[in-house]
Image: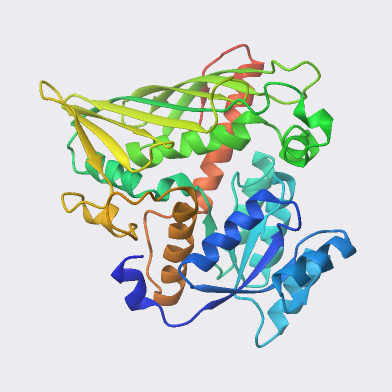
Amino acid sequence: MSGKQENTQKRRLRLGMVGGGEGAFIGEVHRFAARLDDHYQLVAGALSSQKDKAERSAKVLGLARSYVDFEQMAQQESERSDGIEVVSIVTPNHLHAPVAMAFLKQGIHVICDKPLSATLEEAEALYQVAQASQAQFLLTHNYSAYPMVREARSMVKAGKLGKIRSIQVEYVQDWLTHSLEQTGNKQAAWRSDPSQAGIAGCMGDIGSHAYQLACFVGNTQAKEILADLSTWVEGRALDDDANILLRYENGAKGHLWASQVAPGNENALSLRIYGDKAGIEWHQESPNELIYSVLGEPSQRLRRGNGYLSEAATLVSRIPSGHPEGYLEAFANLYAEFAEQLLSSTFNPDLPTLATGLHGMRFISASVLSSQRNGQWVSLEH
């Protein structure tokens, strides 16, 4: 990581985790992220609501303390002199808000996987609890922490694209093209279950990432949207494909396509932004490259790790150019920057916050509402 993070690091933060037991994908990702820059020590967890599974998982990870009930964990850890200072929430969506509230009420900082909650009402309730807490909150929209995404944001803010006119983002996969949730696949099952995933399927899972990325790099938010959500797989309760038109606060217009039923696509997150001077293009599957096209000039391919990039990109690069950095490193960037923020009492404007998550839930809720109204424009302004 950058010298900035190294210079302000004083000690390792005591970390807890809720969710992420054996067989969980995202829990292991978060554990890698927490370890990569050595800012955290995982010491406690409620890794499963099933006692045997929780204890097995804790033993494998060498945790000092294992819990089954997250509220008990929050209470008991807050009473210990060596209790956790930060908790990482890696559960299905329906538990994000109640778990976060339990720890925020005890003054324990929260790192939460996206989306913020299962419903907008839960997100608003969580926001109120957080306002009364001294603890801080990080939402892990990891794509915003790629070096070349930070470069793109810096270029937009510096006016290198001119006045932004068009923001186009898509996030497409193919893994749910058939009813995988009916085969016993755990990851597909909870994402297709409204009681666990919330009001949206594809939109909550990957559409939320696409929207946050568009807003982050474009340095704006949508003010109104028109959505058409589809459920192509027979018997599926939630959306698996979405097309959304967006009108942004900065006057730009755009389109968001999110799909988990697009054969031939693994994890194809792409962003294109065009102004009256230039355009930029970034693809998550080639994350170390940013295409920069000035009107009337040959397109340039900017590469991570080079001296011509801005400080914003350099600060979140670890290794020399030509060595790929990607998904895990982006998660780790968020963890490292949050540790720096907590230990140095400084504020990092690039980190996704609770307010980011609340706006994201308004976007998801508005998308569902617009689609239910057969494609009416719905306002996100509050």
What colouring method underlies this structural image? Answer: rainbow
Residue 110 horizontal/vertical position (percent): 59, 63
Q: Is residue 327 above or below residue 290?
A: below
Q: Is residue 224 above or below residue 91?
A: above
Q: Residue at image x 71%, y 75%?
A: 62
Q: Residue furthest front?
A: 322
Q: Residue furthest bottom?
A: 81
Residue 306 horizontal/vertical position (percent): 21, 51
Q: Residue furthest top?
A: 374
Q: Is residue 236 above or below residue 280?
A: above
Residue 263, quarter of picture: top right
Q: Nearer the viewer, residue 371 or 47?
A: 47
Name the quadrant of the N terminus: bottom left
Residue 343 horizontal/vertical position (percent): 44, 76
Residue 256 visible from this viewpoint: yes
Q: Residue at image x 66%, y 49%?
A: 25
Residue 285, quarter of picture: top left
Residue 245 horizontal/vertical position (percent): 46, 19
Q: Residue at image x 69%, y 41%?
A: 118
Q: Residue at image x 54%, y 76%?
A: 13
Q: Is residue 168 above or below residue 136?
A: above
Q: Nearer the viewer, residue 14 or 307?
A: 307
Q: Please tell me how many numbered marks the rendered image carries.
A: 0
Q: Nearer the viewer, residue 359 or 99?
A: 99
Q: Does residue 324 appear to the left or right of 189 in the view shown?
A: left
Residue 111 visible from this viewpoint: no
Q: Does residue 179 appear to the left or right of 30 in the view shown?
A: right
Q: Residue furthest left?
A: 296
